[in-house]
Amino acid sequence: MKNLQKGDKKLLNAWAFYDWANSVYTLTIASAVFPIFYEALFPKDNHYIDVFGFHLKNSALISFTTAGAFLVVSFISPLLSGIADYVGNKKAFMKFFCYLGALSCVGLYWFDLDDIYIGLAFYFLGLIGYWGSLVFYNSYLPDIAFEEQQDKISAKGYSLGYIGSVILLIINLAMIMKPKLFGITGTDGEAAMKAMRYSFIMVGVWWILFSQYTYYYLPKGSKENGQKLTNDVVFNGFKELKKVWALLKENIPLKRYLGGFFVSSMAVQTVMLVATYFGAQEIQWASKEEGTIGLITCILIIQLVAVVGAVLTSRASSKFGNIPTLIVINAIWAVSCGLAFFITLPIHFYVMATVAGFVMGGIQALSRSTYSKLLPETEDTASFFSFYDVAEKIGIVIGMCFYGIVDQLTGRPRIAFTILGIFFVMAIFLLRRVPKKEILN
């Protein structure tokens, strides 16, 4: 069809709808159903498996696999960013990573301990597909929306993603709780496991199906004819990161803030990625069924409370300043991690999930907006945010490796979880070193 003009309402809505399509991955695969399914594959009294020549704890194995995937993502993101800026048909690249991620989710249906390498490969590729498609998806925003439209349509995308992912998760939860109503046969345990496997297929199908609306309206790329891919084009992203790194030496507030953000984000992202594994192993659920329902319920609580937390954090930052608000949020995270050492009952976990939702909803949005306020006067904001994103991903790599090593050595996720609190204390110290600035303090 004929390309729609920049700023066209249909084009903007089609772009935002990709969040509806792909956000089911982060909720069902990364946070809720897959972690529960993975944990259920192991006997209750044996969480270890021989893989890659090592005798690894299951949660440590998935932590290392996640870290490996994010390491690849942190390396290819600058490459893809450079390509996205120059190539004429970046929609093809976006589709490739979308389909890679979606089909990998479908492949998780066959995840089994007997074929652990294949299963881990699907998990690994699903993560790369999700993040790879986001590079091109985000790069479309300035192409399809005018500056005054970008905040609103970006927020609409997040809202659609939240609604769509929660809808599918509720459907999946119903399937897991009442599998026979959906025609899933077997004993209660077998039927629930089948329902979880079906949910992985549903994520892949949902992702591919709903993304077609986006692809129908999105233009091929920002340039009608594109440019030939050369070494300069491919490695342009790394050159931009190097340029930002050099500029940080001249911007002390931004440099010090990034140090605090790096440590804080490393801990926050790690906590959110491993929370379900922690809950599955350390909380005394009455039965497997109660554990499954309880863990998914906690994820839903976090999603709901995060919206309220984001609003309250925004108001607090307006009244008290960004940096003081971030310091308080990091203090709450630090205390929560310390208390995690003592929680054992489901009610404890529900309370912790509620607190986590409040501070998670605020810290991510406030961290990004604070970074934006500290940027120097420049039109090259894309390079600075590319640096921000890469720093965040490298932080996840370090955090997941740290968690996996402690979990492997001690065999106790609660110890690894508690030690993460130290990073929040470090973040507080680093944030306090950011020079005073009226807009932030």
Image (tube, rainbow, N blue to C red):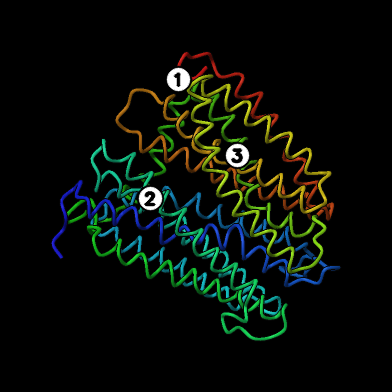
Badge 2 vs badge 3, beta-carbon distance below 8 Å: no
* In this rendering, position of residue 78 left or right of residue 215: right
Q: Residue at x 33, y 48 (%)?
A: 139
Q: Position of residue 441 (x, y in %)?
A: 52, 17
Q: Position of residue 375 (x, y in %)?
A: 41, 26
Badge 2 vs badge 1, beta-carbon distance below 8 Å: no
Q: Residue at x 41, y 58 (%)?
A: 20
Dot 3 alpha-carbon crowd within 10 angstroms: few under 14, some 14 to 19, many 20 or more: many
Q: Position of residue 371 (x, y in %)?
A: 46, 30
Q: Position of residue 434 (x, y in %)?
A: 56, 19
**Camera-side mark, 1 or 3:** 3
Question: Which labelled disc corresponds to residue 79?
Answer: none
> What is the three-letter code of the residue carrying label 2?
Gly
* Secondary structure type for disc 1: loop
Q: Please tell me whether residue 315 is drawn above or below residue 45 in the rendered image.
A: above
Q: Earlier in the sequence, mark 2 or mark 1?
A: 2
Dot 1 alpha-carbon crowd within 10 angstroms: few under 14, some 14 to 19, many 20 or more: few
Cα separation, mark 2 vs mark 1, equals: 35 Å
Figure quadrant of residue 291:
bottom right
